[in-house]
Amino acid sequence: MAKKKITVIGAGHVGATCAQLLAYKKLGHIHIIDVVEGLPQGKALDITESAPLEGFDSKVVGTNDYEDTAGSDIVVITAGLARKPGMTREDLRDKNAMIVKSCAEQATKYSPDCFMIVVTNPLDTMAWVAKQASGLDKHRIVGMAGVLDSTRFRSFIAMELGVSNEDVHATVFGLHGDDMVPMPRFSSVAGIPITELLSKDKIDEIVARTRKGGGEIVSLLKTSSAYYAPASSVVNMAESIILEKNRIIPAAAYLEGEYGLDGLFMGVPVMLNWSGVEKVIELPLTDEENAALQKSAQAVKESLAHLNI
Ligand code: TXD
């Protein structure tokens, strides 16, 4: 199989870590692009110099020119400001919207057939901005957050029960923010629902920690937000597309009627493969779950209503 071309926009914490993991997993040739001169070139060269040790032959190239990214199969947008302690994701909205708009426009000018993964916060709103700016079909663009929120949820379940991470499956719906909707009913350990293994109080505690998972890292790191688990989450999605795995992954998809929502991006389970978002999986929800999901959607709608670009 010919190597795929993957462009990562933003050579910061998340972007550079994505590039490193994509190279280590041999998923394709990688271009890193940033507005800061030297930064993507330096990080790309540093990753390239680990190739003899890590055993990959992909090219990792840093650039400040979108022309070099032409013909990319996958474009990941991580460019933008990140949270500092005391900030909400919404505080980043308008500045990041300008950045994401220009990145999406320029990237699709040279890679009109790409599949785009948006990472910049506030995630669900930035995915909408990128779709508008790129003109990509809804099957070719998705926001990354659900995989991250779910891997946090899974880690906390594994830590609590002292079981292998491998055996824990869990899912989080909704927006990427405090109103996200972790789904205990769709979460299990080796097929056993977690509701059989943990008390309601303990599940509530884990759900609350998951909702604040990003903030917990920001308050510890102080000068940046999380990037190891976010980068792994992006690469997990890229892998499902490139290797045509048909994985069922929670991601911010453009909804047109699913779950009673229309014209916005929000986290739902999707099937990902080479054609992109093959389908949104619609599941029957309880009244309580549906109410939480609608509250989440309301927060996305408010963010879009206040968007100023
Ligand atoms: O779950 C999720 N979706 C997220 C999102 C998880 C973690 C981080 N999340 C968000 O990703 C975070 O809130 C930020 O909005 C982005 C990027 O986070 P990161 O931690 O990588 O931020 P950095 O280290 O500040 O890097 C941002 C880079 C930096 O090198 C800038 O020079 C660059 O973005 N930048 C640009 N690159 C290209 N083009 C333009 N216009 C541009 N503007 C800034």
Image (cartoon, rainbow, N blue to C red):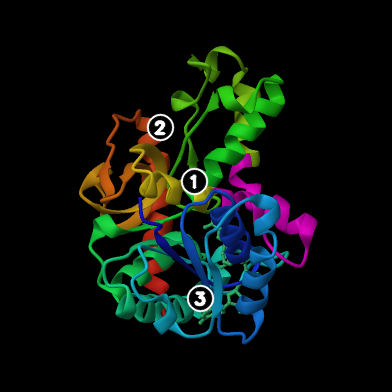
Question: Does mark 1 have its CB less than 8 Å from ligand 1?
Answer: no
How crowded pointer 1 is (Cα within 10 Å; few <14, some 14-19, many 20+) is rated as: some
Q: Nearer the viewer, mark 1 or mark 2?
A: 1
Q: Secondary structure at mark 1?
A: helix
Classify 10 Å Cα crowding around label 2: few (below 14), some (14-19), many (20 and above).
few
Quarter of the displayed picture in which ligand 1 can be seen? bottom right
Q: Residue at x 57, y 61 (%)?
A: 19
**From which residue to which does the magenta span run?**
210-232
Residue 217 in percent (x, y) is at: 72, 53
Task: Give how far across and how far down residue 99 sits, in percent.
Answer: 48, 80
| Amino acid at circle 2 | Glu
Which label sits in the foreground, 1 or 3? 1
Across and down, in percent, residue 287 comes to: 35, 31
Residue 145 percent coordinates (x, y): 49, 51
Is ligand 1 less than 8 Å from the beta carbon at label 3?
Answer: yes
Can I make out residue 75 in this image? yes
Q: Which quarter of the rendering shows the C terminus?
A: bottom left
Q: Residue 96, labelled with which disc?
A: 3
* Amino acid type at mark 3: Asn
Viewed as shown, does residue 19 lie left or right of 295? right
User: What residue did someone put label 2 on?
Assistant: 288
- Label 3: how many residues lie within 10 Å, few (<14), some (14-19) or many (20+)? many
Frontmost residue, 10 versus 215: 10
Residue 189, quarter of the rendered image: top right
- Per the image, label 2 sits on a secondary structure element best described as helix
Task: Give the mark nearest the N terminus, 1 or 3.
Answer: 3
